Amino acid sequence: MMSFYRFPDHFWWGSASSAAQSEGAAHEAGKADTVWDYWYRQQPHRFFNAVGPEKTSDFYHRFEEDIALLKQLGHNSFRTSISWARLIPDGVGEVNQQAVQFYRELIHQLKSAGIEPFICLYHFDMPWAMQQLGGWENRAVVDAYVRYAQVCFDLFGEQVSHWFTFNEPIVPVEQGYLYDAHYPNVVDFKRAVQVAYHTMLAHARVVNEYHQRQLTGQIGIILNLTPSYPRSEHPADVKAARIADLLFNRSFLDPAVLGQYPQELAQWIQDHDLQPITEPDDTAMLALGKVDLLGVNYYQPRRVKARLSAVNPEGPMMPEWFFEPYEMPGRKMNPYRGWEIYEKGIYDILTNLRQNYGNIPCYISENGMGVENEERFMVDGEVQDDYRIDFIRGHLMWLHKALEEGANCLGYHLWTFIDCWSWTNAYKNRYGYVALDLATQQRRLKKSGHWIAQVSAEHGFQVEDHQ
Ligand code: BGP
């Protein structure tokens, strides 16, 4: 017996990318350095095979060819970001007309191809000029970001109907201020909290700014939601999962959707003497930051257990003082990326949003499977990525179940369209529907690319019932 998983007619089929990971032309056409350009020059060894962001898949020059490929994939929507350092090179001053022309043309061409542009304002790419002022630690950078967003709305607000303030705003916080994986490589919980707070304030101000303009589109945020599962029902395990959930999910989800921080988180921050510097009007501003649309990035679950080993009280305080990762026996793994694959997580997230967050309109803005050395799966020039098809189909089946139960999920975007440069991992893990040969810049649809084109055309797929 076969079952057909049918998705709504206007479901968003697409994929996501970002400026720094695709544009290249890092030192061309008036663009200034981001933290990535700067850091790469200082410490190339931090990047896989020492590959930096200057070239990537050269979207800046090849976007027309790439839009044709998006079309071939059956996309009706596509997310990328605007590079702040390209549009306003010094962060605050003059607008770079070459950048205006580029983004205008990009948006125009996408729309002409019937592909709705989803535009994110910030995807980990702080202009170097702004980082020199202290980045998100400095409230002046919040002001600069608001002005940058205003410029974007002035320029492209009529053409773009789906805006996002931030992609995964917790990532620069945790990777840059706790775990030494992004610039500025600070390890300091209190500073991390300040950065998170200012980011959310910047978000709220920009949402408010957008709403005041009464444009016809929507504004949202993209969050990486990682369901926290306790090892067991033991109260200590449950508490560990609850803290992980507060720190990594609710710290951004609650203010973005409900307009305020969870009381429990505020208390926890206070108990550990981590309060950020605030101003009296901030609470009212945060309340205005409620989004119209939520993007959900989901890659893997977070399984935790109560902390058993003692922490070093002299070491810097870390989230892991309050829980330990738990490796569930028998878990399904993506051995290449080292991440658990748990398809039901997507259903759990959508159910949580339905039950506890007013069933806010949302879509899956990233989901995907990174695999190393995909050339070994190449047959007659096409990567036979059946594992990726299985991965996507498995997640879509759970998404479908959530839809049947009333989830307000409007689409599914894969990370990513074409194999991309991924921060310090550079080109290690390949995620695309389209394979990129970095040396020749040749692009080729993978098997999954042909498969998703068919899914999009048929509004779903068929599955044998025992699957
Ligand atoms: C997400 C980011 C993307 C992308 C992806 C894959 O968190 O939004 O920008 O990089 O992760 O990451 P990686 O290459 O580390 O597997």
Image (cartoon, rainbow, N blue to C red):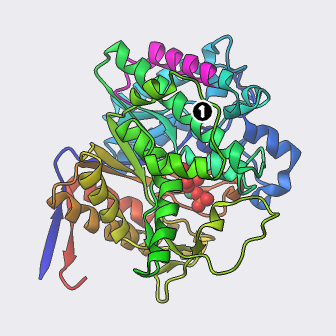
**Going by the picture, which residue comes out furthest to the right?**
42
Magenta highlight: main SS: helix
Side of 388 where 421 appears, left or right = right
**Residue 449 point in image, percent of width and height:** 40, 59
Residue 259: horizontal and vertical position, in percent? 39, 35
| Ligand 1 rendered quadrant | bottom right
Residue at 74% across, 41% down? 36
Measured as percent of width and height from the top left, residue 260 is found at 42, 38
Q: Which residue is mark 1?
A: 198
- Does residue 193 appear to the left or right of 159 in the view shown? right
Task: Name the outermost residue toward the front.
Answer: 271
- Residue at 62 percent across and 17 percent down: it is 98
For the C terminus, the quadrant is bottom left
- Depicted 410 relative to depicted 368: above or below: above
**Residue at (21% x, 54% y) in the render:** 407
Q: In this rendering, would 87 be left or right of 294?
A: right
- Residue 454 visible? The answer is no
Of the pair 422 and 170, the residue shown nearer to us: 170
The answer to whether residue 145 is magenta is: yes
- Does residue 48 belong to the magenta stretch? no
Q: Is residue 406 above or below residue 108?
A: below
Answer few, some or many: residues within 10 Å of disc 1's Cα (few below 14, many 20 plus, some between 14 and 19): many
Kind of residue at badge 1: His
| The furthest residue to the bottom | 330
Compare residues 302 and 2 and report the one nearer the observer.
302
The residue at 47%/80% (across/down) is 231
Q: Position of residue 370 (x, y in %)?
A: 55, 65
Residue located farthest toward the left when viewing the structure as drawn: 1
Q: Would you say 133 lies left or right of 437 here?
A: right
- When asked about the image quadrant of residue 286, the answer is top left
Mark 1 falls on what kind of element? Answer: helix
The residue range painted magenta reads 142-162
